[in-house]
Image (cartoon, grey):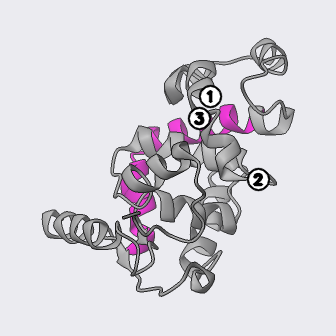
Amino acid sequence: MSLTRCGWVSDDPVYQHYHDNVWGRPEYDSQQLFAKLCLDGQQAGLSWITILKKQANYEAAFYNFDPDKVAAMTEADVERLMTNPGIVRNRLKIKSIIKNAKSYIAMRQQGEGFADFLWGFVGGSPVQNQWASFEQVPVSTPESDAMAKALKKRGFSFVGSTICYAFMQAVGMVNDHTTDCHCYEAVRALGHKESQKR
């Protein structure tokens, strides 16, 4: 018997593994959240599966998204990465990761924790939605609008509201698995467990 998954998931085993084990599970580690936000920004104008299949290449190219190492990257690094076939060779997107790392560090220096800042947009706990089909799922919300605005104010780029909402879904700030999906209850239970901790 095949498992019922959210309607956006294809037959691609990479996609299925990501959906079953990563998407929607609450992430509270600041550096992991930074990495995911940067990767979601790379998706702009492309499909997520394109970036997902390049994730390991991005991790290798950007020091596993260590903000301090990424922020120290130079114009020469940008030129070098423009010849890297393993990532999306878009100058603005490459530079945005470096810019975002600098913004992340600036927040840290001001005593603003990245995870607490981001999770603050949902009150610190996952929002438990109950969508019957993926057609009902929004592409942005007032919360993602607010997050996008706040991130841009802090100097981040490629963080529009749609990207922010995709990010919120991916890192479990909202549970947007559909109610018929085999992951729905497990992700809801994880969210409930995290809420009790906080």
In the image, residue 187 lies at what x, y percent? 30, 66
Q: In this rendering, which labeled residue sits more in front, label 1 or label 3?
A: 1
In the image, residue 149 lies at what x, y percent? 65, 67
Q: Which residue is mark 3?
A: 101
Q: Which residue is mark 2?
A: 44
Q: Residues within 10 Å of mark 3 (few under 14, many from 20)?
A: many
Whichever of callouts 3 and 2 sits on the residue coming sooner in the sequence is 2
Q: Is residue 174 magenta?
A: no
Residue contact between numbered discs 2 and 1, judged by CB atoms under 8 Å? no
Q: Quadrant of the N terminus?
A: bottom left
Q: Residues within 10 Å of mark 2 (few under 14, many from 20)?
A: some
The numbered dot on residue 58 is 1
Helix, strand, or loop for circle 2? Answer: loop
- The reply, left or right, for residue 133 in relation to residue 44 is left
Type of amino acid at the residue the image marks with label 3? Ala
Using the rendered view, name the quadrant where residue 77 is placed.
top right
The numbered dot on residue 145 is none
Whichever of callouts 2 and 1 sits on the residue coming sooner in the sequence is 2
State the residue at coordinates (73%, 53%): 47
Using the rendered view, name the quadrant where residue 193 is placed.
bottom left
Q: Residues within 10 Å of mark 1 (few under 14, many from 20)?
A: many
In the image, residue 82 lies at what x, y percent? 84, 21
